[in-house]
Image (spheres, rainbow, N blue to C red):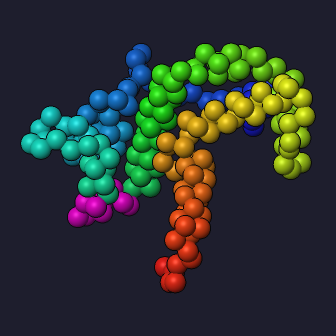
Amino acid sequence: ARAVEHFKSQGKALGIGQAKQPESIYDNPQLYPQMFPWLFPYGYGGLRNSRIQKPVSEERRKQQLLMYHDKRFQLEPLFPLVALNHEQIKKSATAGYLLADHNKFNEIASRILSISSSTLTALIERLKEGPVKPETESEKACFKVLNDLDHVNHKVQGSITSKKYMRNEIWSLVSYLGAPSWFIT
């Protein structure tokens, strides 16, 4: 909601690019060696590298790099951030494709297209003041779209929605099994 408000108030966004073709984060073994040449000497050791004898998933390879013996990947402030960001982008794209394949896709698309910007702006202003209950049909449609987006985001590790689902799962386990007798802090 804040992003929409930012662009409606003529807010700016910065796009940085150097090449004529943008680099893909999918199936690009040279992506990380190009971004972090000081971490990958001579450009070797990227994800999905063809020189690796036993294929490893990208997620597992990132874990291996973060546990590297000289801690260069741990000490680099941007590597974990970029690695997690790429994981979240890929998982949200996959979750979006799963939703697009869902039989309710046409209904969701028409709901998104039917939202008026004035209703969205009014909701943004009311949400700034606290929790809001939808009053009109157009506001209910906005909340349904937010619910659809939550459905996509619950598959993205680290998203607010995935944390909400995990919290609900923990409460369900506590309700079913009882409260734990000891806690790890």
What number of labels is visible? 0
Nearer-the-camera pick, 183 or 119: 183
The residue that appears at 11% across and 38% down in the rendered structure is 51
Q: Give the answer, above or below, for where 174 lies relative to 29.
A: below
Left or right of 103? Residue 37 is left
Residue 11 appears in the figure: no
- Outermost residue on the bottom side: it is 181
| Location of residue 182 in the rendering, given as x and y in whole percent from the top left corner | 50, 84
- Outermost residue on the left side: it is 53
| Location of residue 150 in the rendering, given as x and y in whole percent from the top left corner | 62, 39
| Location of residue 90 in the rendering, given as x and y in whole percent from the top left corner | 43, 35
The residue that appears at 34% across and 43% down in the rendered structure is 36
Left or right of 25? Residue 152 is right
Q: Is residue 123 magenta?
A: no
Residue 171 appears in the figure: yes
The residue that appears at 86% across and 42% down in the rendered structure is 133
Left or right of 77? Residue 61 is left
| Location of residue 147 in the rendering, given as x and y in whole percent from the top left corner | 67, 36
Q: Quadrant of residue 110?
A: top right
Q: Is residue 72 magenta?
A: yes
The residue that appears at 38% across and 31% down in the rendered structure is 25
Q: Quadrant of the N terminus?
A: top right
Question: Which residue range is magenta in the image?
Answer: 67-75
Left or right of 115? Residue 35 is left
Nearer-the-camera pick, 152 or 120: 152
